[in-house]
Image (cartoon, helix red, strand yellow):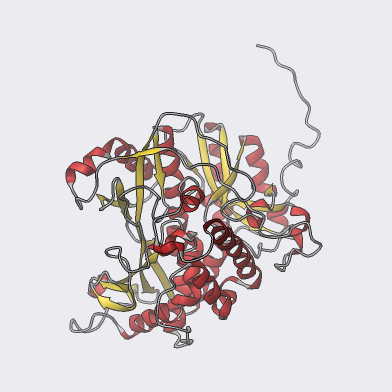
Amino acid sequence: MLSRRWPRPYPDGSVGLPGFVARHGLWDDEQTAAAARVEAALDEVRQVRLVFADPHGLARGKALTPAAFRAALRNGMDFSAGPFVLDTGHAVAVDFLAEDPGVGVGELAGAGDFVVVPDPRTFQVLPGVEPATAWVLGDEYLRDGSPHPLGSRAVLRRVTELFATRELAPVIGLEVEWYLTRRLPGQPSAAGNGFGGQAQAPAVAPLDSGYQFNLDSHLDLAAEITGPLAEALEALGLPLRSIEHESGPGQLEFTFDPLSAVDAADAMLLFRTLTKQLCARRGFHASFMALPGLPGFDPSGWHLHQSVVDTTTGRNAFAADSEAEPLSPAAKGYVDGLLALTRQLCLLSVPTVNGYRRLRPGPALSPSRLDWRVEDRTALARIVGGGEAAHVENRIGEPAANPYLAIGAQLFAGLNGLAGTLPDDGGSALPTSLRDALESFRGGPAAADLLGAPLATLLGKLKESEVVRFETATGGGDPLDGEVTEWEHREYFDVY
């Protein structure tokens, strides 16, 4: 078959900025070596999805041809600033048309492009996707080659570097609850959507009746999805450990073996994204929304297991010298830091209006006290295991949280405790609403210290937009005292 030849005057210069990676020295030796291996493997795929985590923790990306991705390995890839200025309901929360958008990043003006540089170490071929498709994470940069101050992955990397200066390395275990439902027949409706208005959520049916905790028969009903999903996760090298059925109808929990902090966040982003996509292709709907607006559903949480390795000895720094003690002095300092900064940084672990329904009195096994206890699931910090297995389970998070910011916030708080710098957090009670958490986030120095002023300011604007739209839609009062609102279900059930 003959086809026309289309000459391309700038085959390499139409993607990103020419020579961007080498010119700014953005890769280390490991990444450079990985890039060579990736280029050799590109003949085996038809598309490459280059993605990054937006401030909400959602994977945003583009599908590139192998030729375009080869160019992106040298030049990066240009992306619109849209993911930085839109809140969870696609409302414009940052005035990018102004001369100064007000977050300290001039490049946002006019929604100009920024550059995403692939991290070749994260290149993976997605199992079961046709045409053959790879998935790779990227890091965000300004056009001058400096790290983008609104990037999430860089936040967590900076925190781990602070641990490294103390010859420590954090270890993270993921324990994630989510909902599996069956999609009902019919096409999705776009009625009601737009900038700041979401269409109706997908019509679904519960997978089972629920409220038989860990019932094997209910777990078996999910096996037609959890079986292929587990195989896909394992094919990607994700260290899946267990699957169980929780209390709610079709409520599942997946746990993973411990990982380094950045790897754990990368794994969480890939897990959530792949799970939603695989389920949708098979006629199901996966949601990481904390509490869907469906009858009889129970809140889902994201429990973050954490410990710290002393890199000089390879030992768990949380292990106590005596069996009579649950934690070492270093671990107690770490936990004190978690508790001291809970209010200021809660917004990063519980970033949605809906997530605060878990933290109110009522739902079983959600944290109700800002304290730590040994093997007590009502405390925010549950101490688990002993000896070399000793670790802390922070139970505050919702499964929709940005993994880089949620993990980064908790590690940052713990590190402050290890260093003995414990601020007055302004209260001993957990925030009861996103408005409450936003005020604490803006009211102390921790957010800017962790994120940098531009990202802290941006998140404040994004969450203010989200809260105001919710308050306007529900007409004031305290709507979290009642049932989940239609606004919440439309806002979160599909996208998360």
Q: Is residue 167 visible?
A: no
At a point 70% along the width and 16% down the height, the residue shown is 3
Give the vertical position of 496 relative to 332 (above or below): above
Q: Which of 249 and 121 is in front in this view?
A: 249
Give the vertical position of 80 relative to 43 (above or below): below
At a point 28% along the width and 46% down the height, the residue shown is 249
Report the side of 303 relative to 101 (left or right).
left
Quadrant position of residue 263: bottom left
Report the side of 115 relative to 323 (left or right).
right
Report the side of 254 relative to 130 (left or right).
left
Q: Residue 69, image x and y in percent?
A: 63, 41
Q: Residue 401, image x and y in percent?
A: 47, 59
Q: In which quarter of the image is the N terminus?
A: top right
Q: Is residue 193 visible?
A: yes
Q: Residue 246, image x and y in percent?
A: 26, 52
Q: Residue 493, image x and y in percent?
A: 45, 48
At a point 48% along the width and 84% down the height, the residue shown is 426
Number of numbered discs visible in the structure rendering: 0
Residue that protrudes farthest toward the top in the picture: 1
Q: Which of 20 and 433 is in front in this view?
A: 433
Q: Nearer the viewer, residue 355 or 244?
A: 355
